[in-house]
Image (spheres, grey):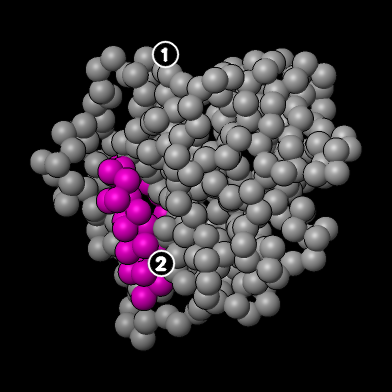
Amino acid sequence: MTSASSPDKPLDEFSLIRRYFHHAARLAGQDASVVLGPGDDAALLTPPAGHQLVMTQDTSLEGRHFPDDMAASDVGYRCLAVNLSDLAAMGATPLWFLLSLTLPEVNEAWLADFSRGMFELADASGIALVGGDITRGPLAISIQATGAVPAGQALLRSGARVGDVICLGGVTGAGLHGLHLWQQGVRQGPAIAHFRRPQPQLALGLALRGVATACIDLSDGLLADLNHVLMASGGLGARLEEACLPLDAAILRDCPHDEQRRLQLQGGDDYLLLFTLPQGVKLPEACFAIGRVEEQSGIRLLTSAGETRQLEARGWQHFG
Ligand SMILES: Nc1ncnc2c1ncn2[C@@H]1O[C@H](COP(=O)(O)OP(=O)(O)O)[C@@H](O)[C@H]1O
Ligand SMILES: Cc1ncc(C[n+]2csc(CCOP(=O)(O)OP(=O)(O)O)c2C)c(N)n1
Ligand SMILES: [Mg+2]
């Protein structure tokens, strides 16, 4: 975040909220579920009949989740995207979100860009900002998002069964590759776009309801997140086929072989869906079948040379 502050007296907290985050007025009449948005002690919302609410929260910190020289509009977009990705993984339709902002100072240019980027994705995804909180401190953005699923239809991590096909909603690796390129000063190209503005797979999540046996979104890396599904499904294992693992064209071109594998299997920040399908179910468009769920615990790779290699389910971790 740059520190250009306004020469004028900074906006007070309430004016700032009204100026940049009172989006509810634009939603009036458009979203009848929001009885009261920002402005009262709490939001007042009407859940859709016959649905269960799906709630998630993710915090993004400058320097840890996004680089300190990332454009504010991309920061706004990204912080909401990572939460929508969790709703997608549950098969939920987005409804409402709360925004908790910790700001080192009032920088109006930054706030205008941040809110523009955030609302760009909010409007495109049909999710309404209904409240939040603002405090002073090192830049941190925490979003709590709520969605809905018809009762009993949420996609869970725990439903994978032996014999299920393990599938990917796209090509992994671009998230971390984008971060590495960013750190080298690159500011353009598909991997950078992917890192700046991850695209939550909401439509795929909806299409997988009643079809997929388990689902998760990839934030920490393919192996680490697949391991969450296998553990939640009763300690199962998996066999992945090297020949079926899709490799990003730019990674193939730019990176040495070991790095290609690391980005593909352990790179975080992909925000794609990983899901399991019962054998014989048609693979959704633009998805990849990469292996099978097995009884034997652990993740194995069947290499193109026909050897079986044990893989460590390592990925991004904040601690340890
Ligand atoms: N501080 C916390 N208190 C309660 N539950 C938490 C906390 N942090 C994470 N969780 C829960 O642990 C689970 C895994 O969280 P996380 O690793 O952040 O998953 P995700 O990648 O889906 O965001 C989620 O169900 C989340 O709600
Ligand atoms: C500046 C910067 N350094 C490193 C990363 C890589 N990174 C940070 S957190 C993370 C994993 C996802 O974040 P987390 O807080 O674990 O989200 P969750 O799994 O809860 O969705 C990754 C891959 C990044 N995105 N930005
Ligand atoms: Mg989380």
For mark 1, what is the residue? 152
The quarter of the rendered structure image containing the C terminus is top right
- Give the x, y percent position of residue 139: 54, 62
Q: Is residue 38 above or below residue 105?
A: above
Q: Which residues are magenta?
A: 109-137
Q: Residues within 10 Å of mark 2 (few under 14, many from 20)?
A: many
Q: Nearer the viewer, mark 1 or mark 2?
A: 1
How dense is the environment of label 1, judged by Cα within 10 Å: few (below 14), some, or many (20 and up)? few
Q: Is residue 263 left or right of residue 7?
A: right
Asked if residue 289 lies in the magenta stretch, the reply is no
Foreground of the two, 18 or 65: 65
Quadrant of residue 53 in the image?
Answer: top left
Q: Is residue 11 left or right of residue 191?
A: left
| Residue carrying label 2 | 73
Q: Position of residue 35 (x, y in %)?
A: 19, 33
Residue shown at 63% from the left, 30% from the top: 166
- Type of amino acid under label 2: Ser
Q: Is residue 209 above or below residue 317?
A: above
